[in-house]
Image (tube, rainbow, N blue to C red):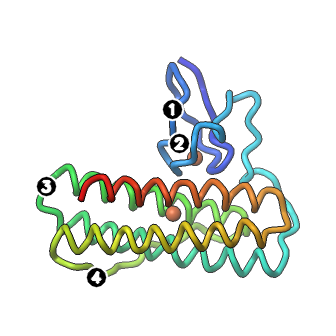
Amino acid sequence: MKVYICEICGDAYIGSEKPANCPFCGARSNFIKDGAEARPIVNESIEISEESRKNLMETLDLEIDANAIYLCMAGKAKEYRITAMYKRLAKVEMEHATIVTKLLGLDAPEAKESACPDSDIENFKKTIELEDHATNLYREFVKKSAEKNIKVFFTALAQVEEEHGELIKGII
Ligand SMILES: [Fe+2]
Ligand SMILES: [Fe+2]
């Protein structure tokens, strides 16, 4: 067994091999390093510009909303597989919100409640919409970020949200 650390969320993964994606924030394996080599972005305090601060606050709201709606969808799903998937998506989105609060030095995020459609198919469509929106927004934020760590953060997040969209497109 070895200790691997995700440079996006800073969480440790203990296992015999590096996972393809961080189980906590979903970042791809290129962001996961051997424990001794990892330099997580959440551990480095950097100056954050007004522009990046604004983009991170928008990200925080979006991720907290995503957590809430996915928990609602988990509760509406007819199949356990879908319930479990939405619970995991909700946790990943809350992890994204948590990373933002660490980058900005804020208190941990508070979960909200949300309504959602009753049918799985409506929820899948809504999920694809939300994930496509997040992917495009974070790609824009990559371009607008002057700070290397913030650029890295939005690059990783854009990939995660894109993969979430692909996951749902593969189900419907
Ligand atoms: Fe991670
Ligand atoms: Fe997210």
Disc 2 residue: CB within 8 Å of ligand 1: yes
Q: Is mark 3 on a helix, strand or loop?
A: loop
Mark 2 vs mark 4: which is more N-terminal? Answer: 2
Q: Which amino acid does label 2 sit on?
A: Cys
- The residue sitting at 59% across, 37% down in the picture is 29
Between marks 2 and 1, how big is the CA–CA gap? 6 Å
Mark 2 vs mark 3: which is more N-terminal? Answer: 2
x then y, percent, for residue 71: 31, 67
Asked whether, in this view, residue 164 is left or right of residue 20, the answer is left
Q: Which mark is residue 79?
A: 3
| Circle 3 residues within 10 Å: few <14, some 14–19, many ≥20 | few
Q: Is mark 1 on a helix, strand or loop?
A: loop
Task: Tell me where residue 65 sits by quadrant.
Answer: bottom left
Asked whether the beta carbons under mark 2 and mark 4 sit within 8 Å of each other, the answer is no
Q: What residue type is labelled 4?
A: Ala
Q: In which quarter of the image is the C terminus?
A: bottom left
Asked whether, in this view, residue 28 is left or right of residue 130, the answer is right
Q: Is mark 2 on a helix, strand or loop?
A: loop
Q: Residue 22 carries which label?
A: 2
x then y, percent, for residue 82: 22, 55
Q: What residue type is labelled 1?
A: Pro
Q: Nearer the viewer, mark 3 or mark 4?
A: 3
Between marks 4 and 1, how big is the CA–CA gap? 33 Å
Mark 4 vs mark 1: which is more N-terminal? Answer: 1
